[in-house]
Amino acid sequence: MKVSLLLLILISSIFANPKIYNAYALAIYDKDGNKEIIKNKRVTNKDYKNICITEVFVNSRFKTDIPHVTIGNSRGHYQSSKSVYNKNNIKVGEIMKFKHYNVMKGYLIITINNKIYDRKTYIK
């Protein structure tokens, strides 16, 4: 009985969906590497035409699906990821970088599993 209960708990934890608390854009880089913090902005200060890199924070304790990050019609291509830990060495999320090509202008939209998590910043 105890073995079957333990096996049931183990299987359910393997197939459980990770809880995603939130996801939002942190910064945007132009093609020269100049950074602009966009965490609390509605509109960017500079124009980002053609190539740019966005930095996104996903707040989740487990490895989640890769978010879909778009600026207008330009879809971001996943580049790298870095885990973020609190003072007790517990994982609180990941910072992911996405590279965008042919950026014109539009809202920066972050979606994970067809759910929109951030759409407040307009990229010029």
Image: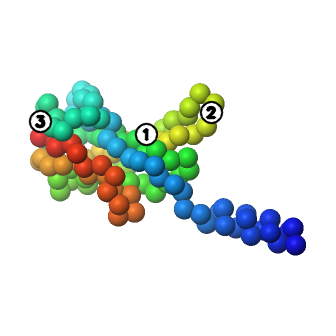
Image quadrant occupied by the N terminus: bottom right
Query: What mark, if any, has residue 95 been given in the picture?
Result: 1
Q: Is residue 104 visible?
A: yes
- Image quadrant where residue 123 sits: top left
Image location (x, y in percent) of residue 34: 24, 27
Q: Is residue 79 left or right of residue 101?
A: right
Whether pointer 1 and pointer 2 mark residues with C-beta atoms closer than 8 Å, the reply is no
Q: Earlier in the sequence, mark 1 or mark 3?
A: 3
Q: Is residue 113 left or right of residue 89?
A: left
Q: Is residue 63 left or right of residue 56?
A: right
Q: Residue type at mark 3?
A: Asp
Q: Earlier in the sequence, mark 1 or mark 2?
A: 2
Image location (x, y in percent) of residue 14: 65, 63
Residue labelled with disc 3: 47
Q: Residue type at mark 1?
A: Ile
Q: Earlier in the sequence, mark 3 or mark 2?
A: 3
- The CA distance from mark 1 to mark 3 is 23 Å
In the image, 45 versus 1, the foreground residue is 1
Residue labelled with disc 2: 89
